[in-house]
Amino acid sequence: MSNEKKVRAYTNIALIKYWGKRDDQLILPTSSSLSLTLDAFYTETSVSFDDSLEKDAFYLNETVQDEAATQKVSRFLNLFREQSGMKAPAIIKSTNYVPTAAGLASSASGMAALAGAANLATGLNLSPQELSIFARQGSGSATRSIYGGFVEWQKGTSSSDSYAVKVDDANWDIGMVVVVVNKKQKELSSREGMKLTVATSPFYQGWIDSTAVDLVNIKNAINDRDFEQIGAITESNGMKMHGTMLGANPPISYWEPDSVLAMQLVRQLRKKGIPCYFTMDAGPNVKVLCRLSDSEKIKTAFLDYFNEDQLIISGPGSDLKEITL
Ligand code: ADP
Ligand code: DP6
Ligand code: CO
């Protein structure tokens, strides 16, 4: 279709992590989180309702998806159907310019782009704040992918006030070098991993308490543009999240040997005077927060141990946007 409207949403990497839900259905988090949106990784999605269809059809990367994947998308679209009165089935076409389910936040860009495309197709004309609330119900991290720059997901008191707000455009010298250790799909989804952690980790309350302090401190550091402070808090918060996972029963670890290697390299570069800090999500890949102006230097140092195609430099991404073909 030549007039088909697509929506592009960028992934985001949390500096202050979301790891646990207080409401599984509505996806309300146990704590607030804060991320940096990345321009190198994104999803583009279109939704078109069509009465002649029998049921929803979901294409990801030009491949028709199975029943389970389609149902997940259908359930999400039903939220838009309920609100708009639209009843027809839809064709959903999506392309991930990010590895799917590999710990590179495809659920963030994927669900945010789907929310944006459903908003267009239903004509609901939702505000960014409302869109953030909808995206949240697809995947928690998607709440934040409505906006570019540094974004906070405020945990709120209920569904209506658990949404993202932009903290800073990040239009300054900041970026990430993403070290793709392994882009295969993970065995344990973020959803299952965090559920098990909340239910069984004795460290969980410590995580809740300290992440609240980290959030206040990182917002001050962002306000002051104190990069080293932002980085130090990011690295510490990510490690604490992985600490809660190690305390789960059975224990959870997403790390691979090359993840540890990448973390060691970051520490070495820091000793040599290059300010850079790592964070990891529910997967083996390592994200190195740095000055964008230092990113080539950092990439070159990593090339001694990793291949060129495993190292992706990204600047800050922008708000979700409509793309007309
Ligand atoms: P990731 O680390 O990539 O975010 P998750 O386990 O959190 O991994 O989420 C992966 C899930 O996100 C997929 O199984 C799928 O349900 C959803 N997802 C990923 N990309 C898309 C997309 N483009 N459109 C809709 N849903 C998507
Ligand atoms: C480690 O948003 O993928 O990346 O809400 O169940 O879909 P669901 O999980 P998801 O979890 C992201 C976890 C994280 C940290 C973060 O992005 O804040
Ligand atoms: Co995810």
Image (cartoon, helix red, strand yellow):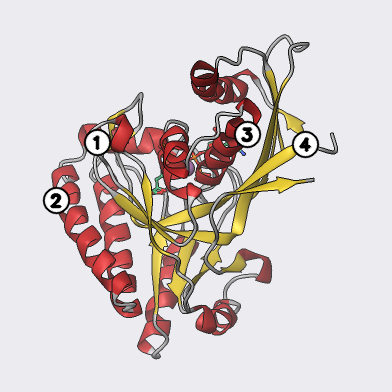
Ligand 2 has an atom within 8 Å of the beta carbon of the residue at disc 2: no
Residue beneath the point at 57% across and 26% down: 73
Residue tagged by mark 1? 198
Closer to the eye: label 2 or 1: 2
Residue tagged by mark 2? 209
Task: Indicate the amino acid at tag 1.
Answer: Val
Task: Indicate the amino acid at tag 2.
Answer: Asp
* Whether residue 256 is situated above or below residue 139 in the rendered picture: below
State the residue in front, 133 or 274. 133
Closer to the eye: label 4 or 1: 4
Residue beneath the point at 53% across and 37% down: 111
Q: Point out the tag, 3 or 2, that comes first from the N-terminus.
A: 3
Q: CA distance from mark 3 to mark 1?
A: 36 Å
The image quadrant of residue 190 is top left
On residue 120, the disc is 3
Q: Point out the tag, 2 or 4, that comes first from the N-terminus.
A: 4
